[in-house]
Image (cartoon, rainbow, N blue to C red):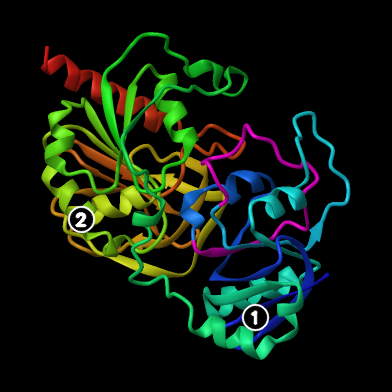
Amino acid sequence: MQGVLVLEDGRVFPGVGFGAEGIETGELVFNTSMTGYQEILTDPSYYKQIVTMTVSHVGNTGVNLEDIESERVWVSGFIVRSLSPVVSNWREQGTLDEYLKSRGVIGLSEVATRALVRHIRTKGVMRAAIAHGEAANDTAALLEIARNSMDMSGANLVDEVSCSEAYNWAERTDPQWYQNHLDQSEGPLIVAYDYGIKRNILRLFTDRGLRVTVVPAHTSAEDVLAMQPAGIFLSNGPGDPAAVTYAIDNVRQLLGKTPVFGICLGHQILGLALGGKTEKMRFGHRGGNQPVKNLLTGVIEISSHNHGFAVTADSDLNGAEITHINLNDHTVEGLRHTDLGAFSVQYHPEASPGPHDSLYLFDEFVERTKEEAAKKV
């Protein structure tokens, strides 16, 4: 059945629709990962975005209920060059087409994704409308819809993806994937702010024996400290970090009172709380093959990314040092403030895109929480 993608600058990319029918809008982005489309679909950081995969063939492993990163699909639309007609995997529980259809998400295949990605790399990410079904025939109307849709700059999307009430997390990873990091002891309590948190982050904390309580993004610093945590985690999430002003204020009040660790949006919010600035990137980093240099050790990590904003390198971070940089464009990838006991990374160490290069960050946070817990005994 007919499908189409219409960009706000007037470019039209026809295709074959799959998944749900209808019209949806979002910021058009691309992801260079070779695998992991199910984790991408269910990552809350992709809320209000239409994701294009650069890999040619997608869907051959189907879907399952084990690799999801949250309770729902968050992308506004999903674009591929070729949707595999064959599904073959020992864990598959359905096809990608069925999965998106049952969750009301539009897919588009047979799209010239190479031309589409080249266009975005040249012009930058932009708003778009995706349509499947009869609505795909009226590209003029879709262009108007795209141009009137939400701009990601200035958008606070955390409110729409965060949990509504606190909960405890106990699930661990499958030991066949992370068998060297299991700790059966009952360790310190940490509080994780849910700005759009991914489940595998939580699993890697519980693997290491931490007790985890997840709280809504709006939870005050006072309420968090009343729980007497040995550490605080700032999660990933969607939208413009500078728009989440309450989170920045809360983190500013928490700094220096207990160890703080942030990932992705949490890293950006930490940077803003320290007095730095953030900026919108031209087309962002999204994929599983980004080279990041650890400036403290000189080691290069192959890392997974999903971000369209970044901490500005020359902003005043009030004593924090830059610990990691992206070797492709020198984007700030890590921060550390020794005196305040806070550190963060822009990339996703929990994603483990093949190698487990960055799991040491979880180990470091665990050690800090144990030291903090020992002070309170």
Residue extending farthest right: 86
Main SS, magenta region, reads loop
Identify the residue at horizontal 48%, vertical 50% (top origin): 44
Q: Nearer the viewer, residue 134 or 297?
A: 134
Q: Is residue 53 visible?
A: no
Residue 212 versus residue 20 in the image, above or below:
above
Return the x and y of residue 49 as percentages of the image width and height. Answer: 53, 64
Q: Position of residue 167 (x, y in %)?
A: 34, 31
Q: Amino acid at mark 2?
A: Tyr
**Left or right of residue 277, residue 61 in this image:** right
Location of the N terminus by quadrant is bottom right
Q: Left or right of 223: which side holds 114?
A: right
The answer to which of 289 and 1 lies nearer the viewer is 1
Q: Position of residue 53 (x, y in %)?
A: 67, 59
Who's the residue at 69% across and 36% down the image?
64
The C terminus - image quarter: top left
Q: Residue at x 52, y 16 (%)?
A: 180
Residue 73, visible in the rendered structure: yes
Residue 295 among those drawn in magenta: no
Q: What SS does tag 2 mark? A: helix
Viewer-closest of 222 and 28: 222
Judging by the rendered image, the residue that carries numbered circle 2 is 246
Looking at marks 2 and 1 on the same chain, the residue that comes earlier in the sequence is marked by 1
In which quadrant of the rendered view does residue 122 lie? bottom right
Q: CA distance from mark 2 to mark 1?
A: 35 Å
Question: Residue shown at 49%/22% (left/top)?
Answer: 172
84 or 220: nearer the eye? Answer: 220
In the image, is residue 196 above or below residue 133? above
Q: How many badges with numbers are in the image?
A: 2
Q: Which residues are magenta?
A: 48-73
Residue 6: give its label.
1
Type of amino acid under label 1: Val
